[in-house]
Image (cartoon, rainbow, N blue to C red):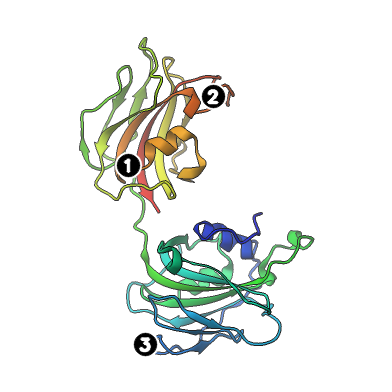
Amino acid sequence: MRRALAVLAAVPLILSAAACGSDGATTGATTGATASGSAAAGAPSGVKVAGNVGAKPTVTFPSGSPATKSSYEVIQPGTGTGVKAGDRVIVNLTVYNWDGKTNAVAGSSYDTKAPETIAVTEQLPQVLQEGFTKVKHGGRLLAVLANDSVAQQQATTPAEPTKVFVFDVVGTQPPALKAAEGKETGESIKGVTVDNPGGEKAPTLTTKTDEKAPKELVVKTLIQGTGAKTQANQTLVVHYTGKIWGTDQQFDSSWERGQPAEFPLAQVIQGWQKGLAGVPVGSRVVMSIPPDLGYGSQAQQGIPANSTLVFVVDVLGAY
């Protein structure tokens, strides 16, 4: 388990590292907040937060040792749509290492100018699962994550400082699409056939061909989506089918598993990174990926060495 507090872009990992394996022992405490959200408010831990929602907060820590019990407080409830379990909440956040000495800021999306998206699921510490559902869009949540929520099997590893998060709720990520939506373009890759049945049905990919495989990456848009363009640092939600060029041998399909795949774009093969960055959400693309941008000379399960890979991919969401 990754315990180190790394870059702010990895905030979902930060949260799970700070307090994964919660067994329900953590507690939440909600207290009254000022109507404007600009006055200081104290959490049960003694931490005080001041400043307006929408700007980097000022946090004051009590003297003495850091809190050993996790908690949360609604600093400003917000007036927009409420957050519920299962939502992907978009937040600006500031995080501190509460070590009782410097209590230094570990990072803030107000500095990077890049809000983060956090899934309110059971993978979050219990204190955050509960806390997020007590605020609405435009609200502010303070969360103290202490080592009481770290799994017992990690007891032999060095303890992390207690972490203090201030979350300003910007909005909620729209749910992912079920399939590509948009206008068919008529584009194709010579030697590859894709049948688009329409609706939420899976496309049919055929790669049986005598055509020579392209030596370079080829990406063609079959259905032009109308959503925001994907970015290299985002996590994508996709449906896809993958086959080997020339043989029609299928090695993978999220459609057959009945569940879209979800992954950080930066952590997949180069062909996907290069081919999917900048694709509008809602699009269906077909990609021919040469070995040097795929798995090269290393054979994989169902993929012979030096294979040219062909994928048809529906980009269903990005966050």
Residue on which disc 2 sits: 296
Residue on which disc 1 sits: 279
Instruction: Provide residue 96's location: percent of width, then percent of height.
Output: 58, 72
Q: Residues within 10 Å of mark 3 (few under 14, many from 20)?
A: few
Residue on which disc 3 sits: 36
The residue lying furthest to the top in this view is 210
Rendered image quadrant of residue 33: bottom left
Q: Given contact means CB atoms under 8 Å apart, are the residues at marks 2 and 3 in contact?
A: no
Instruction: Provide residue 42's location: percent of width, then percent of height.
Output: 54, 88
| Viewer-nearest residue: 147 or 38 | 38
- Would residue 255 be visible to someone looking at this image? no
Q: Residue at x 47, y 29 (%)?
A: 293
**From the image, which quarter does the N terminus lie in?**
bottom right
Relative side of 181 to 255, left or right: left
Q: Give the distance between the C-alpha atoms of the residues marked 3 and 1, in whole angstroms.
A: 40 Å
The residue lying furthest to the right in this view is 156
What's the amino acid at mark 1?
Answer: Val
What's the amino acid at mark 2?
Answer: Gly
